[in-house]
Image (tube, rainbow, N blue to C red):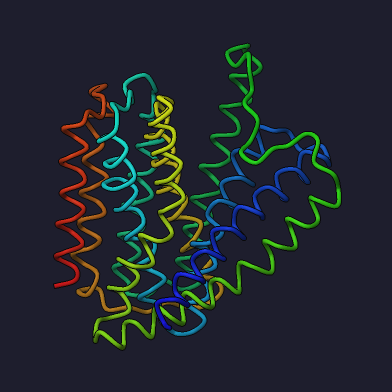
Amino acid sequence: MVFVYAVLGLLILLLAGDALVKGAVNLSLRVGIPALIVSLTIVAFGTSAPELLISTQAALLGVPGIALGNVIGSNTANVLMVLGIPALITVLHTSAHDTRKSYLQMLGASVLFLLLALRQTFDWVSGLVLLVALAYMLWNQIREALAHRRAGQACEEEEPEGADPDMSWWKIAFFLVLGLIGLPIGADLLVDSSTEIARMFSVSDEVIGLTLVAVGTSLPELATTVMAAIRKQADVALGNVIGSNMFNLLAIIGVASLIAPMPFHLPDLAFDLGVMLAASLLLIPFVFLKKDLTKLWGVILSLLYVGYIVSVLV
């Protein structure tokens, strides 16, 4: 039954997170917040709500290994699995998009995270540092986007994810309530069952966070990228992964650290932190050398991820 509870918790989390995004986006647009701001802030926070709830719940329950493993494992999965599997289906034309600045910001966030990890605890001090870095990066993105729009460089502004101009007020309220109630329930189920699975198989909380929880919370990004690849619309996949990884490090651990301290033993996570950074560095050819993600790269990235999961479990 513990596996059933884990799957049930994950499903509730994903559905509740999607509902929260829809409700929050349409409420924001209704009260006059510009679509650009909604895309860069509310959508980003909303789509990371499952990971955020898991990390905060794990921190409160005294299992920081699941919280940290979730973020570290998700960032590794985003590069190796979320980009690797769709590339097996079709070439991802990442060369068509300039992601150099956001990539460097992601690397900066990774280095900052690694430096803070040397303290062997993520507490309120770490949380404030991470959230200040997040605020600066968001402010910088918003300022640049507004400048581009004023200069006439953005003729069309895409609607934020989940936007529905015809959504009624009662539907907005329904989605918000569904998301706000479902997220903590799903997080509680998943964290409790994951902890029990770790005990059953005599593995650490970190291993469960790096594998089961991390893969589960990366499934929405994988499904979105796979569908985009099938429709030949996966050109922005690289930018999405970069943004998601940066947000995971700064926002999720930043908020969770303020709610409850997360002490850990650095040697237990040193290998996984190294793999996360190495996976990030693998993106250099696609960001700076304008290489496309071909099927060969899809095979390489997917095999690397399988090898990593095996190394964690054995």
Instruction: Give the farthest residue toward the right.
Output: 169
Q: Residue, x 65% and y 41% (percent of image)?
A: 162
Q: Residue, x 78% and y 46% (percent of image)?
A: 27
Q: Exactly how many numbered labels are in the figure?
A: 0
Name the one closer to the observer, 161 or 64: 161
Position of residue 252 measured from the top left corner of the image (x, y, whole percent): 49, 60
Residue 122 is left or right of residue 186, and the answer is: left
Q: Residue, x 53% and y 44% (percent of image)?
A: 136
User: Quadrant location of residue 31?
Assistant: top right
Residue 266 is left or right of residue 23, and the answer is: left
Judge whether 58 appears above or below 30 on screen.
below
Position of residue 221 measured from the top left corner of the image (x, y, whole percent): 44, 47
Judge whether 179 appears above or below 209 on screen.
above
Name the one closer to the observer, 100 or 160: 160
Quarter of the figure with the N terminus? bottom left
Residue 178 is left or right of residue 252, and the answer is: right
Quarter of the figure with the C terminus? bottom left
Position of residue 299 measured from the top left corner of the image (x, y, whole percent): 17, 40
Q: Residue, x 23% and y 23% (percent of image)?
A: 289
Residue 286 is left or right of residue 220, and the answer is: left
Judge whether 62 appears above or below 16 on screen.
below
User: Quadrant location of residue 255?
Assistant: bottom right
Position of residue 290 measured from the top left corner of the image (x, y, whole percent): 26, 21
